[in-house]
Amino acid sequence: MKTFSATPADIDKKWILIDAEGVVLGRLASIIAMRLRGKHKATFTPHMDMGDNVIVINADKIQLTGKKRAEKQYYWHTGHPGGIKSRTADDILTGAHPERVVTAAVKRMLPGNSLSRKVMTNLRVYAGAEHPHEAQAPTVLDVKSMNSKNTRS
């Protein structure tokens, strides 16, 4: 028996559309990370970009459980002394770029290496219901119906 290792010719990328309206952020991010990495495929090879292209719409309507919307902090540093800054999840979701919450959650669920940075280019997140990828004919992945815990009640 030989171990299968995929080559670039073996890779079959698909386009997946996910509607994030009413879905819990962490559960959605873990599903997206798995699809981007390609771990849902039987031909998964760890050192190759095997994953699908994922389109996420309605990122501004994502749900957070508990008090996370008001208390979860996103930190960054300006590079200057004393330059630590923070913003709550609610500030970001009601601001100009609510899709950054989903992007950050998915990025943090992937390993921190060069392959993950390449895999993140296959993720497209949009705040509204419109997206410019109709020509790719994406298949819809219904995350809400996968598990009852994926939506906030």
Image: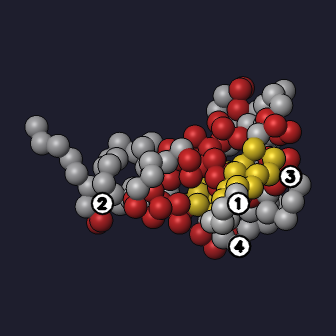
Reading the chain from its start, which is encountered first: label 2 or label 1? 2
Residue at the image point whose x is 26% and y is 55% from the top? 6
User: Residue at 49% across / 57% down in the picture?
Assistant: 52
Secondary structure found at label 3: helix
Query: Which residue is labeled 1 in the image?
Result: 83
Q: Which mark is residue 10?
A: 2
Q: Considering only order in the chain, which callout, 1 or 4, is on the residue closer to the N terminus?
A: 1
For residue 38, side relative to residue 129 (left or right): left
Q: Nearer the viewer, residue 18 or 92?
A: 92
Foreground mark, 3 or 2, reads: 3
**Image quadrant containing the N terminus:** top left
Label 2 residue SS: helix
User: Which residue is under mark 3?
Assistant: 91
Q: Residue at point 41% right, 56% down?
A: 113
**Residue depth check, mark 3 versus mark 1: number of the one nearer the observer:** 1
User: Please, what is the three-letter code of the amino acid marked with disc 2?
Assistant: Asp
Q: Which comes sooner in the sequence, label 4 or label 2?
A: 2
Whether pointer 3 and pointer 2 mark residues with C-beta atoms closer than 8 Å, the reply is no
Circle 4 residue: 132
**Who is closer to the viewer here, 72 or 8?**
72
